[in-house]
Image: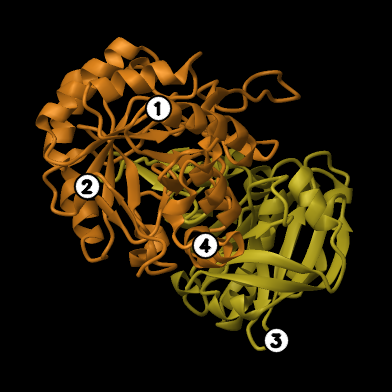
Chain colours: A yellow, B orange
């Protein structure tokens, strides 16, 4: 169920260039159904900026009623959020959308988790859930450069983790798909989140595999009413479009036209 | 006695608050969050004769205390709106105002005739003011003669009262208002969005794929209030006012300016519970102002 909750910031720290990790506490966490869902945050009680900011959930702990968000403080809204201190309350709407399902991998199988930049966070909770049920996870995480890298150790604790940077300043040089072409991974299902060109490259490279992609799009309402975040589908006719916020953000490979 | 009740052509409103067309879809999503029967009415998303996919993305851009949108009237088309959306809405005890859009007179007339026969549609809102479609829309709303012709053509076939939604993108909105009143409009809804543009700092190009978009949100409220004030003096048909309403105080302003009911648009995106919250807050505000009923507020600004 979607709830509007004033959640309390219980931890906040910078973990890479402009990247903030923020822990929020509140009963909204009880409603989270799957990794890859997101929340819609009002960063101010005034009308400037006006709209909420969609931010994906990196991990959650239902017992403690806490969730961790990782976001890039880049625009006006996310900078305002990043400036908030421990103890402050924030207006959060969520959980929203349909996330990844760990049910798509069976125990003993290998899952390939491919993240790019700020698309990396939702894969963390997914990897925790997959490894907990005995799925072997391999993580390929792409960033711009060494100063943008985060959660390398956290992912490494769950399984093999490869860091790939565009400028080669950390890990392998190139894009995630370059790394996978050089050193292929034998897997059953892939899960990916990141910039659209990366999603496109990943989907093409593994067109014969089962895969799930998480998309990003400018949003208005976040609940499916305003039609700001629609994407055309590859299938066309029966379902000409999908809404990223309420039908997604996670879709099986081949659904969204990219 | 219900202090918030308002009677308008075709509409017995339990309160004067309704979500504005285009900001509430067909009610399904908000219906998952609260009981829609609390609302005075619902203005459903614009319906066209055929399915419309709408404009390319990005379709929205944030601006100072507001936002631009160019959705492009995306909707599943008349047949599916009637069969699926209106049927689903019938389970709620709430009057529906169906927003009718088109590209030429003939399709406006066809949609109006059919949708006005739906049992839970109590009124039509004739959309002659959408700034985001290439044909029709605003072209009808900026020319008094075309606006009047379309109004009378739709009035002729509609089984329910017809409200005409006016565009603020004109030099004198009272001219259009008087033209549609003379053509038989039962009421006016106003204002639609103001045409605007936002540029990307890096590329210098418009952020919205459509180039221009409609400006809404708190930023447009003073323009809307001024226009409701002017039109309410110029015509004798009721006005449903809208434009930047975010709380119960804004509702007081619109009613004082001359509106008889108020629609809430963009604020639904900021706070999905804004409509019920406003409805809940109104009686206390009436007490503070020493007024018995909400209708006592209507047109206070005109008193000499």
Mark nearer the N terminus (2 vs 1):
2
The Cα–Cα distance between marks 3 and 4, rounded to whole angstroms, is 38 Å
Q: Residue at x 36, y 57 (%)?
A: B40
| Eye-nearest disc, 2 or 1 | 2
A186 lies above or below A229 = below
Residue ID for mark 4: B282
Instruction: Assess whether mark 2 and mark 3 are in contact (beta carbons under 8 angstroms).
Output: no
Q: Which chain letter matches label 2? A: B
Q: Which residue is mark 2?
A: B10
**How far across and how far down the image is residue A146, in percent?**
87, 49
Where does label 1 land, which residue? B166
Q: Is residue A156 visible?
A: no
Q: CA distance from mark 2 to mark 1?
A: 19 Å
Around disc 1, counting alpha carbons within 10 Å, would you say few (fewer than 14), some (14 to 19), or many (20 or more)?
A: many
Residue at disc 4, secondary structure: helix
Mark pair 2, 4: CA separation: 23 Å
Q: Secondary structure at mark 1?
A: loop
- Identified at 48% across, 69% down, the residue is A101
Q: Is residue B273 above or below residue A62?
A: above
């Amino acid at each position: 169920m979607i709830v509007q909750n004033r959640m309390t910031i219980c931890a906040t720290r910078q973990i890479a260039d402009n990247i903030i990790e923020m822990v929020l506490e509140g009963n909204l966490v009880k409603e989270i159904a799957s990794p890859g869902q997101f929340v819609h945050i009002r960063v101010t009680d005034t009308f400037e900026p006006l709209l909420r900011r969609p931010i994906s959930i990196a991990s959650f702990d239902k017992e403690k009623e806490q969730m961790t968000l990782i976001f890039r403080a880049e625009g006006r809204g996310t900078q305002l959020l990043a400036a908030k201190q421990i103890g402050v309350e924030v207006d959060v709407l969520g959980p929203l959308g349909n996330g990844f399902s760990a049910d798509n991998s069976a125990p003993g199988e290998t899952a390939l988790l491919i993240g790019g930049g700020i698309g990396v966070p939702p894969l963390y909770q997914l990897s925790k859930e997959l490894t907990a049920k005995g799925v072997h996870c391999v993580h390929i995480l792409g960033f711009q450069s060494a100063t943008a890298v985060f959660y390398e150790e956290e992912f490494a604790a769950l399984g093999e983790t490869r860091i790939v940077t565009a400028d080669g300043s950390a890990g392998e040089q190139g894009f995630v798909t370059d790394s996978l072409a050089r050193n292929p991974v034998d897997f059953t299902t892939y899960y990916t989140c990141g910039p659209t060109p990366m999603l496109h490259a990943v989907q093409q490279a593994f067109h014969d595999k089962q895969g799930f992609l998480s998309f990003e799009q400018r949003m208005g309402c976040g609940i499916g009413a305003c039609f700001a975040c629609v994407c055309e589908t590859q299938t066309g006719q029966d379902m000409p479009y999908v809404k990223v916020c309420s039908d997604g953000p996670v879709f099986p490979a081949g659904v969204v036209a990219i | 006695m219900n202090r918030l009740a308002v009677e308008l052509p075709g509409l017995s409103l339990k309160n004067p608050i309704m979500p504005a067309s285009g900001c509430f879809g067909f009610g399904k999503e908000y219906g998952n969050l609260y009981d829609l029967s609390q609302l005075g009415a619902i203005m459903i998303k614009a319906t066209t004769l055929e399915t419309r996919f709408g404009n390319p993305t990005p379709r929205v851009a944030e601006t100072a205390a507001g936002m631009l949108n160019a959705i492009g009237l995306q909707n599943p088309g008349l047949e599916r709106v009637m069969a699926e959306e209106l049927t689903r809405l019938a389970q709620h005890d709430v009057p529906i105002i169906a927003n009718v859009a088109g590209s030429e007179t003939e399709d406006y007339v066809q949609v109006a005739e059919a949708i006005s026969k739906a049992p839970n549609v109590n009124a039509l809102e004739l959309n002659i003011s959408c700034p985001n479609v290439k044909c029709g829309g605003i072209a009808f709303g900026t020319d008094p003669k075309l606006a009047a012709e379309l109004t009378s053509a739709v009035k002729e076939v509609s089984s329910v009262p017809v409200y005409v939604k006016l565009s603020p993108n004109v030099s004198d909105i009272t001219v259009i208002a008087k033209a549609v009143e003379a053509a038989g409009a039962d009421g006016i809804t106003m204002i639609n969005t103001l045409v605007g543009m936002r540029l990307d700092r890096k590329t210098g190009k418009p952020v919205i794929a459509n180039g221009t978009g409609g400006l809404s949100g708190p930023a447009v409220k003073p323009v809307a209030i001024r226009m409701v004030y002017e039109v309410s003096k110029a015509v004798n048909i009721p006005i449903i006012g809208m434009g930047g309403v975010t709380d119960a105080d804004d509702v007081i302003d619109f009613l004082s300016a001359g509106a008889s009911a108020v629609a809430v648009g963009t604020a639904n995106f900021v706070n999905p519970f804004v409509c019920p919250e406003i409805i809940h807050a109104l009686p206390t505000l009436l007490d503070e102002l020493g007024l018995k009923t909400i209708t006592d507020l209507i047109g206070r600004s005109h008193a000499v």
